[in-house]
Image (cartoon, grey):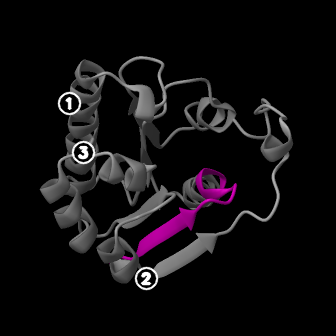
């Protein structure tokens, strides 16, 4: 089986939702899935449900509750360590045949903010583990990521209630 790379990117809503839908589809076909969510630590409805299914392993988190741009240097360093540990754990599972799909949610942001081992993620994207579909998400992926992707979908926001002051809603945005 070829190692296909999927990339969902852009400023539109639905990148994570698309990736989680693909993970759900994989589970329904007996394909185990490992999900790593970078820069996310708050409650997330889809993750809570997916973690209840057999065949799903989830790694997620960051240091502190600040948005990335407001993180202290200490929080950035701790977040980078946590992200690297989660990525290595997920890659170990993928390389040992535990899963057939590896979802790296918000990996583009982790790359942009230098909160991940850049060499390791480059190698992972360019040469995914054998027999593993690799799914990547994020707003502004590096050019090399877009060039490598076999499936590349650009989400473009035309309108969003947030623009008019509506806050994120449970069950819709998270």
The quadrant in which residue 25 appears is: bottom right
SS for dot 1: helix
Residue behind mark 1: 81
Magenta stretch contains residue 122? no
Please state the horizontal and vertical placement of residue 12, each as a whole percent of the image: 67, 60
Q: Nearer the viewer, residue 5 or 23?
A: 5
Question: Which circle's residue, 1 or 3, is located before the other in the chain?
Answer: 1
Residue behind mark 3: 116
Q: Disc 3 vs disc 2: Cβ atoms closer than 8 Å?
A: no
Please state the horizontal and vertical placement of residue 168, each as a whole percent of the image: 76, 33
The quadrant in which residue 88 appears is: top left
Residue behind mark 2: 150
Q: Is residue 163 above or below residue 29?
A: above
Q: Is residue 74 above or below residue 93?
A: above
Magenta stretch contains residue 14? yes
The quadrant in which residue 80 appears is: top left
Badge 2 local density, few (<14 within 10 Å), some, or many (20+)?
A: few
Numbered circle sitting on residue 99: none
């Amino acid at each position: 089986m070829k190692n296909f790379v999927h990339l969902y990117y852009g400023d539109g809503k639905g990148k994570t939702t698309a990736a989680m839908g693909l993970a759900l589809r994989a589970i329904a076909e007996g394909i185990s899935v490992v999900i790593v969510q970078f820069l996310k630590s708050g409650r997330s409805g889809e993750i809570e449900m997916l973690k209840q299914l057999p065949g799903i392993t989830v790694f997620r988190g960051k240091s502190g509750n600040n948005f990335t741009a407001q993180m202290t240097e200490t929080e950035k360093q701790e977040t980078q360590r946590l992200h690297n540990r989660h990525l290595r754990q997920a890659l170990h599972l993928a390389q040992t045949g535990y899963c057939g799909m590896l979802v790296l949610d918000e990996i583009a942001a982790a790359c942009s903010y230098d909160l991940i081992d850049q060499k390791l993620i480059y190698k992972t994207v360019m040469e995914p583990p054998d027999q593993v579909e690799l799914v990547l998400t994020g707003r502004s992926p590096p050019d090399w990521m877009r060039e490598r992707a076999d499936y590349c979908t650009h989400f473009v926001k035309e309108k969003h209630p947030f623009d008019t002051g509506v806050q994120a809603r449970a069950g819709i945005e998270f």
